[in-house]
Structure formats: C-alpha cells, structure tokens
C-alpha cells in the first residue's frame, strides 16, 4: 500500500499577500479549502493556493481564453489546469513576481464576480 505524501502548508506570508489583493475586492473572502486556502466571491472560486504532494506551492486562478493559451505557452512557472477551460496555475516560490500575480488575480476576480461587483474594480491595463 502506497503512502500519500504530506502536503506542505503554504507560508503564511504568501497567503497574506494573496489576501491583500483579493480581500480588497467586493465580497471576496478567504476560506479554508480541502487543502490550502481559497478565495471566493459568492460560490465562485477566484483563486486557490496550496502545497502539492511534490512539495511545491501552486496558486490556481481564472483567465480569459487568450490569456490561458498565452500563459500555458510561456511554460514554467505557469501551467494550464487539467480541469476547466479557463483555469491556470502558477508555481509560487521566492522568485514569484507578486505584482504580476496581483494583476492575474484581479482579472480572475473580474471573471468570477457578478458584473455589478466586477465593475467596481479597476483592471490592469
């Protein structure tokens, strides 16, 4: 019988950095997920950060179709999720560009939020 590897806890500083972006948006709240932390607006998940069984940390978020293809084409640290046509993942570590991630998270919120809430958010250029 194979034993499952433990998933590492996401560094609290990283969770706080994501929450500083998403928690500022209307009705977007952090909550514990099956593993890690997710941010939701209503019942729609905007982002999910977690440690994998491989010891790496990932954040999953939504993107427009052309952005999904562009990010997937860039490759490491980006990847397309194996579920959902608009789900992109990013491996996060000490080299993560947090300004770029904030822009991607803003877009993810605007994709997932009801139009009236998304309209209250200034999107990146």
Image: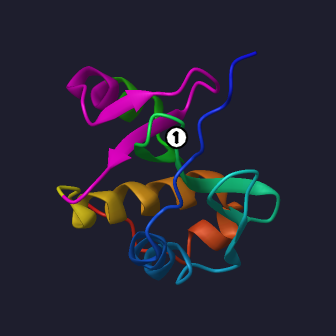
Query: Dot 1: within a 10 Å radius of its alpha carbon, few (fewer than 14), some, or many (20 or more) residues?
Result: some
Looking at this view, name the residue that lies furthest to the front. Answer: 1
Q: Residue at x 30, y 32 (%)?
A: 71
Compared across the picture, whether 89 is left or right of 73 comes to right
Instruction: Measuring from the top left, give residue 112's x and y in whole percent.
Output: 64, 53
Compared across the picture, whether 105 is left or right of 30 comes to left
Looking at this view, name the residue that lies furthest to the right. Answer: 43
Question: The C terminus lies in which quarter of the figure?
Answer: bottom left
Residue 30 occupies which quadrant of the picture? bottom right
Instruction: Measuring from the top left, give residue 123's x and y in whole percent.
Output: 38, 66
Pointer 1 residue:
52
* Residue 76, magenta (yes or no): yes
Work out whether 90 lies above or below 31: above
Residue 46 occupies which quadrant of the picture? bottom right
Compared across the picture, whether 83 is left or right of 106 comes to right
Count the labels in the image. 1
Looking at this view, name the residue that lies furthest to the top. Answer: 1
Q: Nearer the viewer, residue 120 or 91?
A: 91
Considering the numbered disc 1 on the image, is that residue within a helix, a strand or a loop? loop
* Residue 114, magenta (yes or no): no
Q: Residue at x 45, y 56 (%)?
A: 107
Q: Residue at x 48, y 71 (%)?
A: 15
Work out whether 62 lies above or below 74: below
Residue 109 occupies which quadrant of the picture? bottom right
Instruction: Measuring from the top left, give residue 8's x and y in whole percent.
Output: 52, 53
Task: Look at the image and give the residue range highlighted in magenta.
Answer: 70-94
Q: Nearer the viewer, residue 59 or 3?
A: 3
Work out whether 47 lies above or below 86: below
Q: Residue at x 55, y 52 (%)?
A: 50
Compared across the picture, whether 100 is left or right of 57 comes to left
């Amino acid at each position: 019988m194979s034993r499952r590897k433990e998933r590492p806890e996401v560094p609290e500083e990283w969770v706080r950095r994501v929450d500083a972006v998403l928690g500022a948006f209307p009705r977007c709240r952090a909550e514990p997920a099956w593993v890690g932390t997710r941010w939701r607006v209503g019942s729609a998940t905007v982002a999910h950060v977690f440690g994998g069984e491989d010891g790496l940390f990932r954040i999953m978020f939504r993107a427009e179709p052309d952005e999904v293809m562009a990010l997937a084409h860039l490759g490491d640290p980006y990847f397309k999720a194996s579920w959902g046509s608009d789900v992109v993942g990013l491996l996060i570590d000490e080299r993560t560009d947090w300004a770029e991630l904030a822009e991607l998270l803003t877009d993810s919120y605007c994709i997932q939020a009801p139009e009236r809430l998304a309209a209250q958010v200034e999107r990146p250029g």
